[in-house]
Image (cartoon, helix red, strand yellow):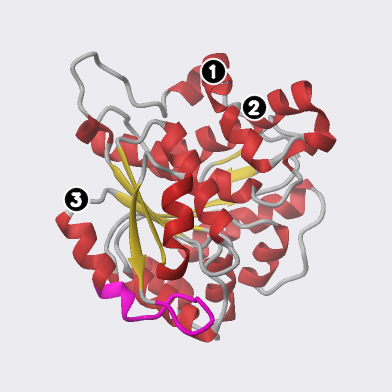
Amino acid sequence: MSLKSLSRTELREGLSRRESDDHKGVYGHCLVVAGSRGMAGAAILAVRAALRSGAGLVTAAVASGVLPVVAGAVPSAMTLGLPEDSAGAFRPDGVERLKQYAKERRVTAFAVGPGVSTRPVAARFVLHLLSGLNLPAVVDADALNILAQEPEGAAQMLKARGRPCILTPHPAEMSRLLKTAKAEGEPSRVKAVERLSREWGCVALLKGHRTLVSSGSRTVVNLTGGAALAKAGSGDVLTGLILGLWTQALASGRVEGDLAFKSAALGAWLHGCAGDLAEQDLTAWAATSSDLIDFLPQAFKSL
């Protein structure tokens, strides 16, 4: 099976043009819902990546107990503390606060999943959020595993939202979502990502060596990225990066076509390129997920 990768010219079509008289509102407001007790780092990585993507405004919505840590780590972002249970996990009553905030602050799109945990109370929070916050959404990490635990109706719920979603599973999360064995080899991986996209009505991105991005009718392979990405937190960086790129495309009106597909493909390329640059400078052993964010400016330049 031979898959096409996007050229740099095609990838640049997903970038929102910058004009000298623009203001931050042109580039949208993205909301990162992430980070519970013990996993504040996931929120920090995703938020830092969203900021590096060029989004106009970024808010980190986190469990209230980790708010001081996140706020201190990402001073360029706004923060919103949400109710938590005794274990520091999100509570469902935080969804109404998020919906109100999104309306008041004109949020463009949101991401949910990194570091939210899969505790039952957090699972109810995630399901209420996805069904109740009617905005484009990037769904990753714990949020994917929560959806996979639903006996039925999760795919229908996402389709019923009426707003686009980007799902970004790694191979194990993909197998849980589809309730199949882990896909091995490119033909099986292609079938899996296309099936997820069609059945869940979303753009699907299957992480791993030669990351795949599919809209169901169109599937491309990403050729950037190597061993430096095989570190905890790399996926959180990708989530924030895709969210930020998508937010700009949605808010600016300067990108045409399937914005979710273009943002996911562009995010995968930039993420992998940053990993390649980090590996060249720091080695595959020493590069960390936070280093990826520091190499994003060079990745943008190389595009």
The kind of residue on which mark 2 rests is: Cys
Q: Earlier in the sequence, mark 1 or mark 3?
A: 3
Q: Residue at x 42, y 61 (%)?
A: 67
Q: What secondary structure prevails in the magenta region?
A: loop
Q: Secondary structure at mark 1?
A: loop
Q: Earlier in the sequence, mark 2 or mark 1?
A: 2
Which quadrant holds the C terminus? top right
Read off the residue under disc 2.
Answer: 273
**At which x and y percent is residue 211?**
67, 42
Residues at discs 2 and 1 in contact (Cβ within 8 Å): yes
Judge the density around disc 1: few (<14), some (14-19), many (≥20) Cα neighbours within 10 Å: some
Read off the magenta span.
Answer: 84-96
Nearer the observer, 182 or 273: 273
Question: Is 231 above or below relative to 64?
Answer: above
Q: Residue at x 54, y 59 (%)?
A: 40
Asked whether residue 206 is in view, the answer is no
The kind of residue on which mark 3 rests is: Arg
The kind of residue on which mark 1 rests is: Leu
User: For residue 225, what is the image quadrant?
Assistant: top right
**At which x and y percent is residue 267?**
52, 36
Read off the residue under disc 1.
Answer: 303
Read off the residue under disc 3.
Answer: 106
Q: Is residue 20 left or right of residue 124?
A: left
